[in-house]
Amino acid sequence: MEPSINITSISYIRVLLIPVGPLKKTTFFKHVKLVKEFSELKLGDVTPDMKKGAGGRHRFLSPVRRASFESIIALLRRFSWNFDCLNAFRIHILAMFSSQVFQEGQLHFQFLTSYSRDHAFLEDFQMQRRVFGVIGIMDCQEWKDGDLSQGYTKFLGMLEKYPTAIATRCFAFDPNENQPDTTKGLIMIPNVGNMSFYMSTMICDFASELLSEFSTLVSIRINVIVMLLAYYKNSPLAHRLGTIYSHRAELMNCRSFATFHTSVVDLFFTTKASAIEQRVYIESPNPFNLAQSPSIPPQGFNSASSISIKPPTPLSINPPDISPKSPTSVGIIGPAPTASFSSTFMKRAVTAPNRGATLTVTSEGSPTPGPGAITRSFSSSNLSGPLSPLPGDARLRKRTPGRIVKLIADLYLLSGRLPDAVNSYNQAIDITRNNSDYIWLASAMEGLVCSTLLLEYLHADIGIISRRPNTPPDPPGSPIKEQAPPPNSPKPTLVDIPEKYFTILSYYAKNTSSQSTPTPPIIYIEGCLKVARFLATVYRCGGWGDKTLGMLTQGKVLESNNNDMADGINVTASKWEQSLKSKNSGVLKYDIAGWVMRAWTAQVENLSTTDQIHVTTAMASLLSVVGYRRKHAFLLRQSVLMILPLLIQTRTAMGTNPVSGHGAMGQNSVNGGTNANILKADMGVLGCLREICEVYGIRVNMVVYVVLKFPYAGQGDEEEDFKEGDDRDFKTSFPGGALHQSGWPKLQIDILRECITISEALPDYAAQLHYTTLLLKKLYRYIPKDEQFKLASSIPRIVAAGKKAGQVESDVRYWGVNVVKAIEIVKQIHRKVPYAHPLGPQDNVLSAAQDGDPFIYNPFSKKAANDDKVRCRNFTKIFRNDTYIPEGLLVTNELAEFKVSLMNPFAFDLELQSITLSTIGAPFVTTPATTVIPANGFINVRLTGTPTHPGIMTIRGCNIKISGCREEEFLLDSNKMDRLRGKKTEEFKSVSGVVKLKKSGLGAIEDPRKEARHKAQKIQFLEVEVIPEQPLLKVKSTSLLHGAIMLYDGELVHMGIRLENIGTISVDFITLSFSDSTTTTQLATNPELPPEDVYEIELFTKATHVFSWEGQHREDTQIIGKMVDLPVGGEWEVIVNVYGKRGCTGGTIQVDYGYLDRPIVNSEASPGSIVSTPKNFYTRQLFLPVLITVHQNLEPLNWDILYLRSAENQSLDLRAGDLVQQGGGIDESTTKCQHPVETLLAMTRNGEVKEKNEYCLATLDVRNVWTVSFDVEFMVDNNYPEHSKGDDTVTSVSSVTTIQPGSTKRIVLPIKRLFLSPDYTKQPIPSLQLNKQFVVAKGPRYPPDQERQRLQMFWYREELLRRVTARWRCHPTNRHGVLYLRPSLRLTSLQLNILKIDDIEFEVELSSGNATDYHIDRMGHKKFRCPVNYFVEMTVGVVNRRGEYYQKRKVTNDPCCNQSAKLCLRVQPVQSYNDGAKEYDLSGKMVWQGLLQVVLPEIPPHGGRVTHRLPLCFVSRGHFEFLYHVEDVATRQVFYDHEWAIVEAVE
Amino acid sequence: MNMNIDVNCIAVIGKQNNPLYIKNFSTTHPDLKYHYIAHTSIDVIEERVTQIKTPDVYLGLLYAMEDLAVYGYMTNTRVKFIIVVSVPDAVIKDADMKNLFRRVHTAYIMQVCNPFYNSDSHKPIESRQFSRVIDIIGKTAGGKVTGVGGPDSSA
C-alpha cells in the first residue's frame, strides 16, 4: 500500500527506481525527478514491438486467425489476440498488451524509490501491487576510474531482490566522453542535447518491453495455474471449462504442449485438454493464514521462480536472451527477499522442482478433447505433487477461471487498454458473482470502476459515458444490486462510484464474515479510502469536470501537494478560497469523513504496524483536505504513536546495522540510514506533532524557547508575534499567552505528554525540551504540583543530554511565563526630587484670560490659558505657577531605585541568579540582584542603578537569569502595567481585552490571529527621562532654637538659614517660598458676610505674610528668586523675616534651588536660542518647618474720634492740659512721654485762630496684656497733600507711651480731618483674592445712599488706618513690632462725620453794621462778644466746595464738578447757662429781624458763596449759641456745622 | 426509562469549543478517550451547522468510531452536547436520543440559571448539582435504573 491510495491507482504500473553503486543522494533524486516526468505515457507513443524486429519474433496474427479465436471463446470474445510467438516453439502468442490496439490509452507509471514486500501476498490478487519494472540509475561520474560494467553487474545483482520485475533498465547518467558505451544492457544517457526527448524514447522503449512482457507474464501465471491444476482432479468446473473451451482445443491441437510458455489461450487449451480433471486453484490473498491455507499466488509465483534457478535475465534493448529457451528460463524470477514467507514457502520451494517436472509432463500430455481424456492424462502428475488437499479446494477450483479473467483484466487496465479491460472485468464480474467469489468480484468491480473512470477521462466513445450534471450523491444507504455496466448506467459517475464502492465494500465485508479466508482488511480499508479520496478530489476541485478527472487519474487531490504532510500544513492558506468552491462540488464533507471513518471502523488494529501507519496517515491527510482538522489531528496522533516504536526500533537497530533503515514508512521513509535521514524522519514525526499541537490549540513557537539547532524554524507568522516590532531578534515578551488561551486543557496536556515521550524516544532533545517547556508554560494551571516538579527538574537533564548529543547548543531559554509583572520607579526622598519648570519663550505677558475672564474654570478658554502659561514660562518670571513634579525622572549620576514586581505562577520556586534592569537609550549602570520567587508567589524586588548620561531612557524590562536557563530579557509592556494599576485606556481595552473572534472553532485559531497581529500595538515600554546632574543643598543650621520661635503679635524677627551645598555641582539659583498655618488652613469666607468683613478676613489671611525674604522687597522678587553662586561645598545664608501674625502656629520655608545652566542665561537676549535649550529646568526643594507661637501683648480698645473745636490760645492750652492730666490720671507716676500730647495739640493751633480747626481728636485705649512693659509709639501721618491747604508745616506727629503690664492707657491723637473725593469713595470694596470666582452677592443689599455711606465709611477707615500707625517696643528685650490696630478701629457714622471735611462750609460773622458806638469783640473762631441792646448783624455764609477737588485737577467735564447747591438754612439761637442748661425760649432775651429759616439762593460749586444776614439784638446778657444747619432741598441732606457760633452778650 | 441506550459518555462543549463538562460512564475506556472523541466531533458539528441553514438542535449521529457512536446536539447559544453510546444491536431511535439530549439540555439550563455561574468564562462546570443530574441521565439511559452501577457491557 502506498501513501496515496487512489481510485485509479490500480491502473498504475509500478516501476522501482533504484540507485546503483556509489551515488550521491541528490544526484539520484535529480535523476528520479527526470524520470518521473514520464509517469504518463500515451499508448500511441509506445514503441511498437514489431519495430524492434530483432529476431522476427513478433508477428501479428492474421485477421482470419483472430476472428477464429473470437468465434471460439465467448468469454474472451472481444479481445484482440495478437500472438507473440516464441521462437523456440513457433507458437504465435498473442501480443495481448500491444500498444497499438488502443492508441488513446495511457500508461501510468508509478515510479517508486522504495518498495516493501509487505503486501506481496496481494500481488497476485491485485496485479498493480507488483513491481513490474526496475530502473537502475547510475552516475557515471562516480565511476570515472572504474568499469561501468561492474556497476551494471551490481545492478543485476540488485535485481534479484525484485523478482516480479519483468522489465529492467539501467540508466547511466552523465557519462564522460571517454567512458565507453560498451557495457551491454547499460544505457548511457549523456547530459547533452534534449535529454527529455531522449529519456522519453527510453521510457517508451521500456514501456514497450513491459507490455510485451505482460503477455509473458500472463502466460507464466497461467502456466502456474495449469501446473496447479495438475494437482486436483474431477472438478466440475474444470469440466465445464473444458466444455466451454473444447472447440478451441481443436484449434490448438497443432500446437505443441510441451511448453508452459503459452498464451492465455494456450492455457485454456491446456487446461481443457490436458487438465480437465484438475482443479483450478487461485487462492484469495490471505496474509494471516499463510500456514493453514496455501495461498498460492504469492508462493506459487515464487515457487515458479525457484524453478529457474538462474538469475533474472537482463532485459535490455537487445533482448535475444530473454526469449526463454526452456520453461525454466522464462520467469523473471528470483528468490523472494522477504522473510515473511513462512514455512509454507519453504515447503513450496522444496516441492517446486517437482512441480516443474510435473508441469513438463503435463505439457507433454496431448490435449485430448473431451473431459474423459483429461482425467487420464493427468493422473500421473498427481504423484509428484504431494500437496495436501485443501479445504474448500473444490470451490476454489470452481472460482479460478473468474479470477483469471480478473487478473487479465487487471493487466489490460495496467497496459492502458481500457475497452478490453472493461470487457474482461465485466466477464470476471459475471463469473465471480456466479461463484459467490465475493472478494474477487469486488476486486473486479473496483477494476471496472477504475477503467470506466479512465475511459471517461479519455473521453473514449465506448458507450454513453459522458459527463452529466452533477447531483449530490445519495448517501450510500442501501446496498445496490449489481449495476449494469457503466455505459448503461443512468447515474452520473459521481453518484455511481460511491454506490459501486458501497457494493464493493459490502462484498468485501461479506467475504470477511462468511468465509474461511477472510478479506484482508487492508483491501477493505483501501476501498474506503479510495472512495474518500475520490470524493475529496471532487470536493476540492469544486465539482465534476475534466480537471477533476485529470486529478483523479493523476492521483492527486490538490494540484500542488501529493504529500500528506503538505496537505495538512498548506490547507490553511488556501482553505478559505477553496471552501467556496468546495461547497459547490456537490460532495458533502460529511460523506468524505464518513468514508474515511469507515476505514477506521474496520479492523485497523489487525493490520501490520506499517499498514496501520499508512492507513492512518492517509486518513489523516484526507480529513485534512476536507477541513476536518480535529479528526485529522486525532488520526495523525494515532499514526505518530504507531510510528514511534518503529522509529525507536530503527534507531536501536542502527547501532548495529546502519542499512536496516531500509523500510518504507510512508513519508518518513528512511532511505540511506545516514544521520541526516534520521533527522529528516524525525522531522516528519515532529512536524506531525506540531500539526497536532496546532489543532489542539497549543501554539507551538519553537523559536522562542530553544536555541538554534532546531532543524525547522517556526512558521513565520508565529515568529512575528514575538518580534514586537523591534529589530532585535526574538525576545521573550510572552504576548498573547492568555489571549489565545484556547483549547482543551486535558487534551492538550495529553498531547504534550505524548509529544514529550515521542521526542524523548527519538531522541530529539530540542523538541523534548520544547514540549516540556510548552507544557509547563501553557498548562501549569492544570498540572498537579508533583508533575510540575518533575517537568521542571527534567529540563536541566534534557539540556545536559541535548548538549552531549549536540542538539541543544547552549543553555535553555527560559520557557515559562513572564515573571516580570511591573516595574516602578521608587520615588526619591523628598529633598532629592527634582521639580520641573518648563522653560517657555521670552513672552512675559500674562494671559488676558487671567484677569479678563470672570470664570476661573472656563472650559473654553482653558486651552488658551495653558498656552499662555507655556508662553509665560520664563524662568525669571513665572516660576511657581508651572512647577510640577514630573513622573519618572532620574538624575544623572544619582542612584535610582526601581521596584520590580515578580510573579511565579508555578508550583516550584524560581531562583533568579541575577536580575538587572534592561534599558536602552541613556546609558544606565545597573546593579544586579539575586532573589528567589517562591512557588505561586509574588515578590517585589528593588533594583538599583545609576544613569550616567542625560537623555531618554527606556526600560524594556529585566534581564533575568533563572537558574538553569540562559539570561533572558523579560519585556514589560507598560500598558499592561497600567492595567494592573487599574488604569484603563481605551486603546488598551481594544487591544488586549477580550479579543472578539468572529470565527469559531479552529478557524479562529488561524484567522483572527492574523488580524489581531496587525492590530496589535507595539509594546509600550516605560520611558524615563534622565536629566542632567542636579545640585543638592542641605540646611546646615538656622538661627532658631529647635526650629521654634515665639513672637508677639505684630513682631517681626529675622531668622537666618545657613545652606550648604553638598552636591556635586554648584547652585546658581535659589528662591524661597513660604507657607504658614494661616494660609494653608484658610478661613472660609462666608459669602453672606458684608464685603467689608470679607475684605478684612482676606487681608488677614492673604495679605499678611508670616514669612518674607529679607532683602527682597518687591513682591515679585520675592517670588522670582535670586541668582547666587554657591560652589560645591560652599555655604550661604538666607535671612527670612518672620512676622508675628495672630493665630499662626507654624509654617514652612521652602527653598527651591537649581543649577540653571548656561543656555538659560541667553534666553532673554536672544529668543531664538531657546529653541535649543531644554524644555524644562529643574530645581530641588528644601523644606524647613518652623514652629511659631504668637502671643498677644497689647490690645487696642475703645476707639473714638472727637471733635476738636478751635479755641483761644489759653483755653486751648488749658484744655489740652486737662486732657493730659486726664490721660496722666490713669497712671500718673509712670507717664513718660517722648512727645507729650500738648505738643501734639499745639500743632493743631497753627494757622490763624479764626480759622476753622483742621484737626479732630482720635482716642483709644491700649491695654498691656503681657507681663512686661511696652513702649507704644503712635505715628500719625497727616501729610495729605491733596487736601491740605498748601501751607502745612507739620506733616506728622508721633507719640510714645509706655504701658505697664496689665495697665491700660488712653492714647490721644490729633488727626487732620480728611477729605476723600467722591469718586474715590465710590469705588467698590476691593478683594484681595485673585481669581476669585464671581458670585452674585448674597449679602444684604442697601439703598444707594446707604451704600454710599458704607463705602465712604470703608474708604475713610482705610485712609485713617493708613495714616495712623503704631509700633511697640519692649525695652528689656529690645523687641519691637507693630501694633495691629485694624481690628479695634471701627468707624461709626458719627465718627465719620467728625473725621471728614464736608462739602458745605459755614462762615459766621457778627458785625455791628454801621454803628460805631460799640464794637464787637472777636474772641475766637465763631466766637464773639457784643454788647446788649445794640443791634448787631449776623452774617451766615454758606460755601459750596463741591467740585473744588476737580477744579484743582482741571477736570471739568465730570458731572460731580458742577454740583451747585440749593439749600435751606435754619438758624436756632439758644441761651446757654453756665450750668449747662439751655434755654430755647428766647423771647425777651433777644430779638431778631426776619426769619430763622430761609431758602438760600442756589450756590454755585467751586467755592460759591451765599450769605444770609440776620439782624438781631440781645436784650439780656448771657451766653448765646447759634445753631444752624442747611438742608439740601433736593436730596434732603442736612449739613451741620459742628462749630456753631457763640455770642456772649455783655453790658 | 426503557430505552436501551448504553451511554458511555456525556460531554458539554462550550461556545468556543472549550470543554465544559465531560463525564465518562464506561469502565472500559479511559476518560481521555472521550475527551478525544468529543473534541473530534466538533469537526462534524461545525460542518453540520454551516451546511444546514436552520439546523435542528439535534444533530443526530455525528460519526461512528470503532464500537462507539457519537451523537450531537447544539443549543441556540452554540453550546454542544455530545453523547457517546456503544453501538447496540438494536437500532437507536432518534426520538430516544433527542429525549436524552433534552434532559441534558434541561440540566444545562439549570446550571446556567445559577447566578454564580459565569457562562462566558471558559472554566469547566464544577457544579455538584449538575454532575448529579448528568450522572442520573447517563446511568438511567441504558435502563440501569436500579443504580447497581454495574459495569457497562461493551459491544
Image (cartoon, rainbow, N blue to C red):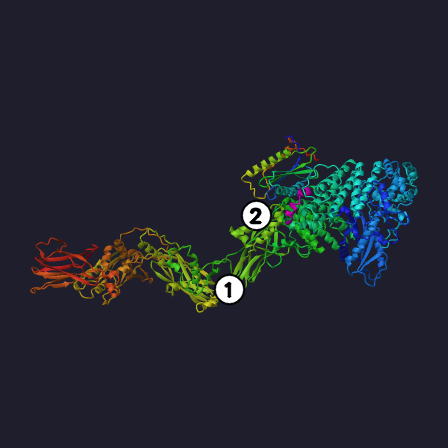
| Residue A219 seen in the current view | no
Q: Nearer the viewer, residue A761 or A1072?
A: A761
| Residue A492 seen in the current view | yes
> Can residue A1528 be found in the magenta stretch?
no
> Can residue A579 be found in the magenta stretch?
yes
For label 1, the crowd category at 10 Å Cα-Cα, with few meaning under 14, some 14 to 19 and many 20 or more, is many
Sequence order check, earlier mark of 1 and 2: 2
Q: Position of residue A392 (x, y in %)?
A: 83, 36
Mark 1–mark 2 contact, CB under 8 Å?
no
Q: Position of residue A1296 (x, y in %)?
A: 27, 62
Label 2 SS:
loop
Q: Nearer the viewer, residue A206 or A1205?
A: A206
The numbered mark at residue A1125 is none
Compared across the picture, whether A39 is left or right of A1328 comes to right
Q: Which residue is mark 2?
A: A996
Image quadrant assignment for residue A1439: bottom left
Report the magenta residues as a range: A577-593
Q: Quadrant of the C terminus of chain A?
A: bottom left
Compared across the picture, whether A883 is left or right of A360 comes to left
Query: In this rendering, do the residues under marks 1 and 2 share a single chain?
Result: yes
Q: Position of residue A63 (x, y in %)?
A: 85, 46
- Residue at 60 percent of width and 44 percent of height: B16
For label 2, the crowd category at 10 Å Cα-Cα, with few meaning under 14, some 14 to 19 and many 20 or more, is few
Number of marks in the rendered image? 2
Instruction: Please report, as a chain letter, where disc 1 is located.
Output: A
What's the residue type where badge 2 is placed?
Lys
Question: What is the magenta segment's predominant secondary structure?
Answer: helix
Label 1 SS:
loop
The numbered mark at residue A1029 is 1
Compared across the picture, whether A1120 is left or right of A939 comes to left
Q: Position of residue A896 (x, y in %)?
A: 53, 59
